[in-house]
Image (cartoon, grey):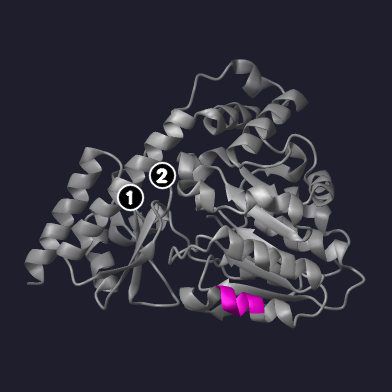
Amino acid sequence: MQTTDSSLSIRLGPIMTNSHITPKKQPPINHGGAVDRAANRYGIPTSDWLDLSTGINPIAYPVPDIENAHWQRLPLTAELDGLKAAAKQYYTLPTTDHLICAPGTQALIQMIPFWLKDRMADQATKNVHVMGPTYGEHERCWRRAGYHCQTHQTDPADRIAKATDILSTAETGTVVILVNPNNPDGAMFAPDDIFKLGKLADARSCWLVVDEAFMDCQPDQSVCSQIDQLQNTVVLRSFGKFFGLAGARLGCAVMDCNLATDLESRIGPWAIPGPTMVVGAQAFSDTHWQQQSRTRLTADAARLDDLITKNSRLALSGGTDLFRYYDGKDCVALADHLGHRGILVRLFDHDANKVRLGLPGTGIDWKRIEDAMADWLNANR
């Protein structure tokens, strides 16, 4: 989860050539993972922090030895084909023609609004509806492309109904964005519900963007396997979160074959580094590691819930097996307490009574959060 930097803006620049706007400079969004800012605030070196502010798997896929050639030459077409073949199996897609790979899901989130704007140049409607509260970069990036964007603050129980109501009366070209499972509340919606939204978007000549960045722990809940029956649905998938390799910068988009061909042409050649392709293809194919990780993450999520709820007044409000979401009046104070101990968690501007924690990885990490929570309990009896 990172904000736009100058190098990425330059790389994605060509897709903006048909969009006659000058993007307004926007303030950066606060994301998880900002250990450098926390280090400055609390006076603790970055190397001493336990970062629980993201939803990244703390026990990463083991990176294999990578031949020097992958660092020294441009990536080969055959290597990209191999990566896409492995991703096709992992995401249970009908064909690789439905899939594109990009340098991170964030790059796709920034790219797609300009791409769709070019495709819909003859349509007057430029309305985007984000089902929130959710990942802030969606609204930010669609606004940057010149769309009229509204984030609807919804309860999980009402989110599908709200999206359905919007699409049922929407003008041609309207875009609805739904994150599933949602970040930060973790609300999960059945693939049949998402599929119905996609068919409704098709019928109304609208668009549905489904962000499945945190879907890997429940792969059977993805709509990806039905993508060949949907014309105007784009599904986003993240490699770095579940596999714990956010620095690899690999994301995928799943969509209609013709759409995929068009969007892939906008990305251009060599977008994915050769070493990332090697790691990605192996990780996508390693079903044993995947299942072991899912089992461990489920157990660790329950362990963290037990630790937090027994040592504070916070209650579990939601989450996924990669992050937990808690509710209570002590969230800000607890985050500060943990910060003084070099443990970073995620607070939210939309609700000061919510906090999100990722999972500790090693035994040492667990001991740190356990000791910190014991101190909190003793100080707040």
Identify the image quadrant of residue 176. Answer: bottom right
> Going by the image, does 85 lie left or right of 375?
right
Tag 1 residue: 359
Q: Quadrant of the C terminus?
A: bottom left
Local secondary structure at mark 2: loop
Residue type at tag 2: Asn
> Going by the image, does 201 lie left or right of 64?
right
Local secondary structure at mark 1: loop
Residue 344: tell me if it is visible. Answer: yes
Residue 144 lies, in percent from the top left, at 71, 69
Q: Is 135 placed above or below 56 here?
A: below
Q: Is 15 placed above or below 72 here?
A: below
Q: Residue furthest right?
A: 122
The segment highlighted magenta reads 160-164
Residue 103 lies, in percent from the top left, at 65, 43
Q: Is 147 placed above or below 302 here?
A: below
Residue type at tag 1: Leu
Residue 38 lies, in percent from the top left, at 36, 58
* Separation (CA) of disc 2 from disc 1: 7 Å
Q: Residue at x 14, y 52 (%)?
A: 371
357 part of magenta stretch: no
Residue count near mark 2 (Cα–Cα under 10 Å), binned few <14, some 14–19, many ≥20? many
- The reply to whether the C-beta atoms of the residues labelled 2 and 1 are less than 8 Å apart is yes
Q: Residue at x 66, y 55 (%)?
A: 235
Q: Residue at x 82, y 70 (%)?
A: 205
Pick the residue in front: 13 or 151. 151
Tag 2 residue: 57
